[in-house]
Image: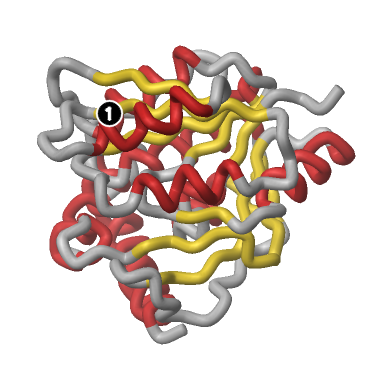
Amino acid sequence: MEPLVSIVTPCYNSAAFIKETLESVLAQDYKNWEIIVVDDRSSDNTCQIVEVFTKRHDCIHLIALTQNGGVANARNIGMAAAKGKYIAFLDSDDIWLKDKLSRQVSYMEKELLPLTFCAYKRINEQGKEISGQIPVPASVNYNALLAHNVVIFSTSMMLKSAVGDLKFSRAGHEDWIFLLQLLKRCGQGYGINHVLAFYRVRQNSVSSNKLKAIGYTWKIFRKSEGIGFLRSAVLLGRYAVSASLKRLR
């Protein structure tokens, strides 16, 4: 019996993209999955679109929140509802290739791995590819991830038992903080250097706002991880360089 994968998808005003995201999950050649869509009090028709899918597919679930609590809260609620051996995360505007789940589950089952991630390509809001393959290393530990976040969260899959009681904090780059905390527990994450996902770059996203991203990164080093000023400054410099190089690909 193939292990169940629980997919957690937080969404907020995602009507323009959520249909394509869900269809990419339905197209997976790995079939033992559930997806938990947590709507963070959208003001558009995101919920109505998702409800159409829930009526047609028993493995698609919608949790519609009555108050907006942010993406960290939505992910925590989705994780709490997850029943699978593995938890995968998929943002509501990103897309998976059809063999994404099968490759990751096969690799994790064979090697008994706690965390995997994969290479990807960037697309714009219209779905056009705007980068070549963004490669990933064969493995990453806490110090390596601290110096450079190589994991796009929509490519990650983790063993639920390894996650345990970890929760997302309400901070900028909450996915990066979560992965750092997870690596403190499990030691290493492992990369699959094949493009298995498309990461959508949106004009108004936090990741597209360079000054805001730098501010969040500084807070991770200083407050979340408790790193001294000088080392934080060095890490921030490395972050800026690696982020600039990534955008050139």
Q: How many marks?
A: 1
Residue located 26% across and 53% down the image: 16
The correct choice, above or below, for 77 with respect to 199 in the image is above
Q: Is residue 184 visible?
A: no
Q: Nearer the viewer, residue 57 or 39?
A: 57
Q: Residues within 10 Å of mark 1 (few under 14, many from 20)?
A: many
The correct choice, above or below, for 8 with respect to 142 in the image is above
SS type, badge 1: strand
Residue located 53% across and 18% down the image: 82
Q: Is residue 90 visible?
A: yes
Residue located 49% across and 38% down the image: 89
Q: In the rendered view, does 239 fall on the left or right side of 149?
A: left
Where does the image place residue 200, in percent across and percent down from the top left? Answer: 37, 62
Which corner quadrant of the image does residue 212 belong to? bottom left
Q: Quadrant of the N terminus?
A: top right
State the colouring used for the structure image.
secondary structure
Q: Nearer the viewer, residue 215 or 41?
A: 41
The correct choice, above or below, for 176 with respect to 245 in the image is above
Q: In the rendered view, does 14 fall on the left or right side of 32?
A: left
Residue located farthest toward the bottom when viewing the structure as drawn: 248
Q: Amino acid at mark 1?
A: Asp
Where does the image place residue 40, in percent across and percent down from the top left? Answer: 22, 28
Residue located 29% across and 67% down the image: 125
Where does the image place residue 194, in percent across and percent down from the top left? Answer: 69, 66
Q: In the rendered view, does 184 fall on the left or right side of 115?
A: left
Q: In the rendered view, does 149 fall on the left or right side of 50?
A: right
Which corner quadrant of the image does residue 64 belong to? top left
Where does the image place residue 141, in percent across and percent down from the top left? Answer: 61, 48
Residue highlighted by disc 1: 39
